[in-house]
Amino acid sequence: MKAIKKAVVFTLCAAILLGAKLPSVINATAEPNDQAPAILSEANGGGTMQQQYAITEENLSLYGSSGTKMTIVDGTIKTTPEGEQKAIINDFSSRLFDVSYSIEPAATNGAINGGLYIYASNPGDPTDHIDALSVNIDRAVGEDNYQLFIYSFNGDSYLGAEAHTIKLRYHGGKVAVRVISDEEFINVYLDGSNIPSITKRISVTPAKGYGLGFRSLNARMTISDVNISLSHEKPECKTVKLLMIGNSYAHDTMIYTHELARAEGINLVCGVLFYGGCTMEQHANFVANRSKVYTYYKNGMADRSKTDFFDVLYDEDWDYLTFQTGHGYGGKEEMWYPYIHDLIALVERLCPTIEIGLFMSWVAPYYREGAGDYKLAMYNDSTDQMYAATVKCFKDLQLHNGTKFIVPAAVAMHTAHGTSVCDNTSLATSIHRDTTAHANEKGRYLLALTMYRTVTGRRAEGCTFDPVGSTYSSVAGPTYEERLVLQGICDNAFDAYGYETLNLFPEPEELVALRVENAKTTYRVGQAFDYTGMKVYAVYNDGRKVPVKYYQIDKMRKLTASDTEIVISYLGQRAVLPIIVQ
């Protein structure tokens, strides 16, 4: 076996390697390399032979639509910008895999367009017309952001995007990607996170297993740090799944929520069953008739269209579900009954473990007063009256229907008016983007914070997610300064108005200060510090004040005239006690 100076290796279970031929989707310009892969090492673990192989040209079959192919240099795959290029792993076939790699542009401002390529090595059920998927990182030249896509193919034809994320901030260098297939789902993780950015049901249906490789399109970049195993154990993370039965306001709310929670280490699966402007009466009719009129969004992006209530209700093991009605009708009790009662009863019968809540849609902004808004006309053309009626109606709905929680989106959005992020005077300076009060990027960020706090119980202050924007047009996300203001508005909606959270991820306990009380502070020269009767308390981030028994005092000696303070320490925190020595 020839020497290999440096190689990225992948681990394969030899017992399930199948010698499959490449499908037509490859656009082959050369015959597959028949040479067996170079084995670096092998070990017998638990009765199954484990083998390690090198990423080398001998291991891969290379293809290029323009005749130019990828190259392999010291275990790193290098692509060129001439058309579509693929590097297919020879004789690989498995339905289970765990693949990690890094991808980066060859130049700092260069494009990224490519990633892992998954194809049906033995095509099975052809009904979905999909026989290949590409897990793609897309970054345009010079952009400070990128998106993760899963593209689908049929033979030589590109079909479209099966799933994608919102735009994510690109900080330069490598993007770390991990892809895990467990036969039913493909889970894609970014930058070392244990929370998937995309979880997608697999559309490729091979009879035996998937083939793997790497693909690029018109981009000069490198793919390195490759590791492949046949394990499919996903990283552990506590997951909460929430489904909103709603309309475009629900969609606005969930655009940023998954990624905002992911940035804080929380896996919040966010589903929206969407029908534009949908009222409770319409929801009830659609459910009764099993109408396939909804679009289903998951984690902010469209998952499927022309679907029905039951299809989405059973798509995940939802933990929580919220109902909402159409904009402007939240303060009208007659718009809720009997529909809310009937729908709650249905969900409780079909999915008895789901906890049900209410989503409080926001009200028309002040600049719509006097503009002939027919929704405001139901409230004497008064934003304040519309808001007051909505808050009262939701309290009554929760009382009479026993729902577990309210998402106070109306409170957060309404109290934002008159602040530096929304000055009440016009659409251009508001948190809305149109005359029907849909949220703009600032509004969508505030709504995500509100949902995040409702579910987790954690304060919005300090959330690290940096939204790029461009979720509905080429409008940038809120600035750092705007995010700080919006975080304060969100927290105030809970702190000042008493809305309770589910508190599923309480703030980690953190000792933030020591407090010293009843200490003697005046002494004569030669006296020792007297801690008799002194009380020391540990103060935690949730406001608790806990007595401390064992602490350190820095001056356990006779005091001198130059001593001006006593330092008391406990678990890394210090309290400085000024003293006078005469």
Image (tube, grey):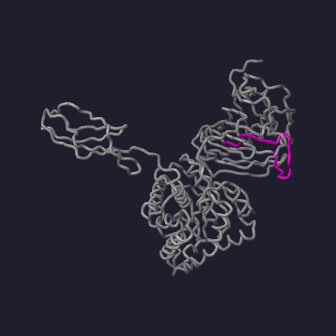
Q: Nearer the viewer, residue 294 or 338?
A: 338
Q: Is residue 212 left or right of residue 410?
A: right
Q: Which quarter of the rendering shows the N terminus?
A: top right
Residue at image x 79%, y 40%?
210
- The segment highlighted magenta reads 111-131
Q: Is residue 386 above or below residue 474?
A: below
Query: How far from the left and from the top, in percent, is residue 61?
Result: 81, 32
Q: Image quarter for residue 72?
A: top right
Q: Is residue 121 magenta?
A: yes
Query: How far from the left and from the top, in percent, is residue 88?
Result: 79, 35
Query: How far from the left and from the top, in percent, is residue 461?
Result: 46, 53
Q: Image quarter for residue 70?
A: top right
Q: Is residue 269 left or right of residue 559?
A: right
> How many discs mark residues in the rendered view?
0
Is residue 34 in sight in this rendering? yes
Query: How far from the left and from the top, in percent, is residue 316?
Result: 68, 54
Is residue 53 in sight in this rendering? no
Q: Is residue 558 magenta?
A: no
Residue at image x 62%, y 54%?
241
Q: Nearer the viewer, residue 73 or 386?
A: 386
